[in-house]
Amino acid sequence: MVIVIQKTIGEGQRATNRPNSNPAITEPLTDFFLGKENVMSTELRKNDPAKARQYFADKLAFTTGPVELARNLKQGANISVIDVREAADYRKGHVPGAVNLPHDKWNTGEGLRKDTLNVLYCYSQVCHLAATAALEFATQGYPVMEMEGGFAAWKEHDLEIESNIAAADGSRKRPMTLAA
């Protein structure tokens, strides 16, 4: 069985076949236009179950979600939370207890610990800063995990936010019901 998914590309963008991409996915390209949008088809093919099992086992070992992180923090787990977003965004709001380590300070390793798990997050599901940071920090010997969905997912789950900007009551922590 072959499933075909249609992807729409904005006007002026060009799709290309990617060398060394997943062989289970092919991207036959078309140059026809429907209105002002170019349409590209992605053909999904049966994959190797053993490789899929390994991929998802690895994914579970190296990623977590915001709810799981919040539960672990509430239970006092020995973890270090690292926010790799820009400092200005961190000041507006972040996961409680997170240390800010923006890209321009990655070489300092500030806040990272080798004796415990470092959970990294960035902006959103489509942001790859945390994954890029995880690769770099793991190369330096730090145990790392990525929080999927980034800070956007944390906010979507109405989890507590800490801020460097004082709330009306003078506190630095605020529930998600306030504008973030």
Image (spheres, rainbow, N blue to C red):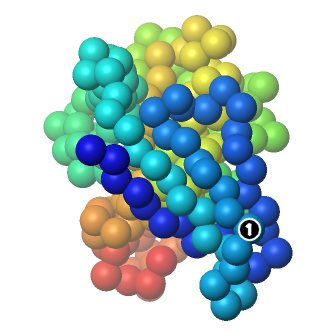
Q: Residue at x 24, y 51 (%)?
A: 67
Vertical comparison of 38 with 115: above or below: below
Q: Quadrant of the N terminus?
A: top left
40 or 87: nearer the eye? 40
Q: Residues within 10 Å of mark 1 (few under 14, many from 20)?
A: few
Q: Residue at x 75, y 26 (%)?
A: 108
Residue 80 shown left or right of residue 110 in the figure? left
Vertical comparison of 111 with 125: above or below: above
Q: Residue at x 54, y 59 (%)?
A: 41
Q: Residue at x 55, y 42 (%)?
A: 26
Where is residue 68 shown, x and y percent of the image? Answer: 23, 43
Residue 50 shown left or right of residue 84 in the figure? left
> Which quadrant holds residue 45?
top left
> Which quadrant holds residue 161?
bottom left
Q: State the residue position of label 1.
A: 31
Where is residue 52 shown, x and y percent of the image? Answer: 31, 25
Q: Which residue type does callout 1 highlight?
A: Asp
Where is residue 105 shown, x and y percent of the image? Answer: 77, 36
